Image: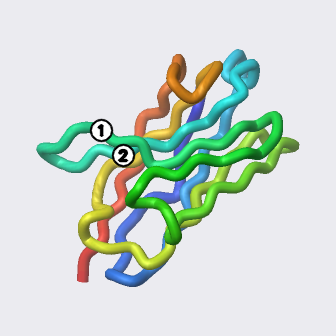
Amino acid sequence: QVTESGGGLVQPGGSLRLSCEASGSTLENPIIGWFRQAPGKEREGVADISLSDGSTVYGGPAEGRFTLSRDNAKSTVHLQMNNLQPEDTAVYYCAAGPNRWEYDYWGQGTQVTVSS
């Protein structure tokens, strides 16, 4: 399974760090991806990271503001989000999969709210 943590309420321009911990059979999957879904909108990809080589891919909203990192010893991936804006408000999910196009394991999601 994968478990997210770190969501919350932040003011515009603020920062949050989300974490995704993988356990069990999900550790066999080399890709951890972050997604988000805002009310009334479709789910969109935010960023993903390879646990094997650390390579990352960022979606449009994340580029220049979000940074992924990994802690393989703890099977945890962190998503550092800076300069958050109200349009970043969403439920953020992490997922584990065999490649960047297939995700087999999904977390429950963590709410991120950006508001003054």
Which quadrant of the figure contains the N terminus?
top right
Q: Residue at x 67, y 22 (%)?
A: 26
Q: Residues within 10 Å of mark 2 (few under 14, many from 20)?
A: many
Residue at the outermost right position: 73
Which quadrant of the figure contains the C terminus?
bottom left
State left or right for residue 52 relative to residue 62: right
State left or right for residue 62 relative to residue 55: left
Q: Residues within 10 Å of mark 1 (few under 14, many from 20)?
A: some
Q: Amino acid at mark 1?
A: Arg
Q: Which mark is residue 29?
A: none
Q: Residue at x 48, y 27 (%)?
A: 106
Residue 24: image x %, image y %?
A: 72, 20
40 vs 84: above or below: above
Residue 67 in which image quadrant = bottom right
Residue in front for this viewpoint, 30 or 10: 30
Q: Mark 1 sits on what residue?
A: 43
Q: Amino acid at mark 2?
A: Arg
What colour scheme has been applied to the protein in the rendered image? rainbow
Residue 56: image x %, image y %?
A: 65, 48
Q: Which mark is residue 36?
A: 2
11 vs 66: above or below: below
Residue 45 in which image quadrant = top left
Q: Residue at x 25, y 71 (%)?
A: 86
Q: Are marks 2 and 1 in contact (CB under 8 Å)?
A: yes
The disc, 2 or 1, on the residue closer to the chain's N-terminal end is: 2
Residue 5: image x %, image y %?
A: 53, 51
State left or right for residue 77 relative to residue 58: right
